[in-house]
Amino acid sequence: MKFEIVGKNIAITDGMRTKIETKLSFLEKYLMIGEDTVARVVARVYPNSQKIEITIPTRIGILRTEVTHEDLYAAIDLAIDKLEDQIRRQKTRLSKKHKEKLAVSFIKEIEENDDTIKDEIVRTKSIKPDPMDVEEAIMRMEMLNHSFFIFTDFDTEAISVVYKRKDGGYGCIECE
């Protein structure tokens, strides 16, 4: 993992850099983080406190935390604790949901909802769907806490969408 450590209103010392890199390197035991992954850390100083922001894009999703504390080193420790907690929660949530619901969700027929809502488009986003299997797409959707996820299916090489169903299962829409 590579590190991009930036200080706002503060000069990042070698001690700060070493502490941040050591603590963040410890997270590699939880996730498959590639060598080209860049962990972005922003340290800010305010009149009464100091803030640390950490963002790590992983294959599964983006891990992000912000912590404000009087001591920067304590803020770093608290931020690492928050990231570890995020990882643990996601792994637990994914393992529970996948065991029971994954098989059942694809057997059921996809329901189409006839409710049409006439609203204006607020935001447009372009994506390049990554190739993966359905289980990985569901895992990424859960890590991002989204209700759907667009991907390119490994087997068919077609663009597909997985989504959460109202009954708690998952659905998959495949393009022809």
Image (cartoon, helix red, strand yellow):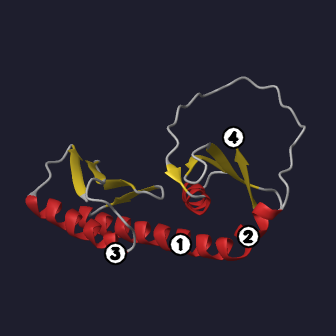
Secondary structure under tag 2 reads helix
Question: Depth-wise, is mark 1 or mark 4 nearer the camera?
Answer: 4
C-alpha span from label 3 to label 1 = 13 Å
Residue at position x 69%, y 40% from top?
A: 175
45 left or right of 149?
A: left
- The mark found on residue 91 in the picture is 1
Looking at the picture, how far across and down is residue 127, in whole percent?
A: 52, 36
What amino acid is found at the position of numbered circle 2 in the picture? Ala
Q: Quadrant of residue 117?
A: top right
The first of marks 3 and 1 along the sequence is: 3
Q: Quadrant of residue 17?
A: bottom left
- The mark found on residue 103 in the picture is 2
Image height of 42 relative to 71, above or below: above
What amino acid is found at the position of numbered circle 1 in the picture? Lys
Question: Depth-wise, is mark 3 or mark 4 nearer the camera?
Answer: 4
Reading the image, the residue beneath label 4 is 175
